[in-house]
Image (cartoon, rainbow, N blue to C red):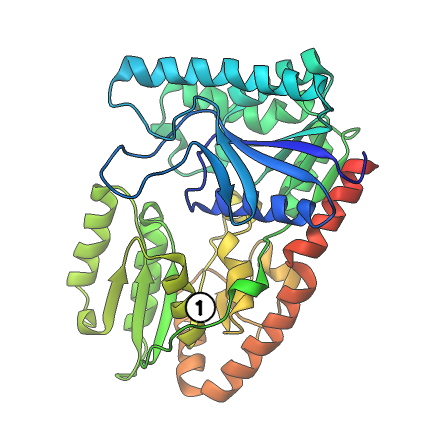
Amino acid sequence: MRKNAQIYYFGTYGFPVGYAQIERQKLISKGLMAQGCDVTIISRYGIHADTSDAEILSTGNYEGIKFKYATGSPYRPQSFLKRNWQKIVGGINEFRMIRAKKRNGGLDYIILSTNYFYNIFIYRIFSKLTGVPLLLDTVEHWTSFSDSKDKNWFIRWDNKMYDNQSFNYVDKVLCISDFLMSHTEKLAPEKPKLKVPAMVDFSKFKAIKSIDEKYLLYCGHAAYWEVLFFILEAFEKIDNKDYFLYLVSHGNPEDMKRVKDRIAASPKKDRIKIFSKLPYSDLVDLYMSSKALLIPLRNSAQDIARFPHKTGEYTASSKVIVSTNIGELKNYFSDKENALLAKDYDVDQYAESLAYVVNNPDKAAEIGIRGHLVGKKEFDHLSLGKKIFDFMNA
């Protein structure tokens, strides 16, 4: 692959919405751009609500990355028929874009980030028809999700196909965890694969303002309400009246109500604050002013397979990470060395880790600084971008 390689990065979530998967797309793109590649992120259809807020462009440049909506609109139609017609039009336009780029100057690679197997199948057809190799970035093991049984038959089938067949429909695979590396090796041992963990742009983590409160911070989607409840219960066990618990969460109204009701019932409800839809700069400020950043992982296939994007961001803040000795975190961190890791996903053990922060603030701060060094070594998007570039070239 040439140094100034032309790459189309297809992300079917929509861009530039700030989901973790989108942040990963951006960081992979920036890492490749630092190697001289020309990367364009393409979304098949718009997902933004058409409101009177600031105009969202259908083609442009976001944080230095070129992006384009294949339908020509970043907005999601209210009509069911129009929405699905937009998806068809977007898919046709994507193929036309790939073919035109290949003919006029060349297209070196297609990168794909998607949660659905049917998308992998579609892009494999595009790849075969145009002769452009296809690289899949995989970050989850979908059939291990606790709500799998509640999904409709098509999603259950698609999840199963994604986990068991997706590797056979691409040329190379990026895996976010050892679990997914082993899973890919078992199902497709001949397939080239590279582990790319959580990624972070360290240059963004400079505090703009300081929050003058002692607080522990957790960031997570309200769909993970069980984890939120776990953190609340652990926080309630701490014998300290000086510290607050800050929760940054968003999600559907039902999940958010469940979380808010649980907070309202807490004996420490006056020490708990919840934030939603924060600008990224405000979120970074919360990171930088916190006393600890919480991210407990459960002993489940779902959590062992994934690598929370927040982990990289947490290391960038130089604040101590409080987690569990489970999954990918135990590959990079050790308890009381560069993080605080409860041995198991146990409320009492996790409460002890939180109490350590409260009772030993200076030691906790030193642990956070050592965690930052781990992040700089392992999660920097520029060094990982070079690894990805070399892997695509091999």
Q: Tag 1: Cα neighbours inside 10 Å, few (<14), some, or many (≥20)? A: many
Location of residue 350 in the rendering, given as x and y in whole percent from the top left corner: 42, 68
Location of residue 145 in the rendering, given as x and y in whole percent from the top left corner: 44, 38
Q: Seen from this angle, which residue lies furthest right?
A: 394
Q: Is residue 140 above or below residue 378?
A: above
Where is mark 1, residue-wise? 293
Location of residue 153 in the rendering, given as x and y in whole percent from the top left corner: 39, 18
The residue shown at (44%, 23%) is: 156
Q: Is residue 148 above or below residue 389?
A: above
The residue shown at (42%, 18%) is: 87
The residue shown at (28%, 34%) is: 49
**SS of the residue under disc 1:** strand
Q: Nearer the viewer, residue 220 or 32?
A: 32
Q: Please state if 255 lies on the left or on the right of 350 as rendered.
A: left
The quadrant in which residue 141 appears is top right
Location of residue 212 in the rendering, given as x and y in whole percent from the top left corner: 32, 81
Q: Amino acid at mark 1?
A: Leu
Let me know if residue 89 appears in the view.
yes
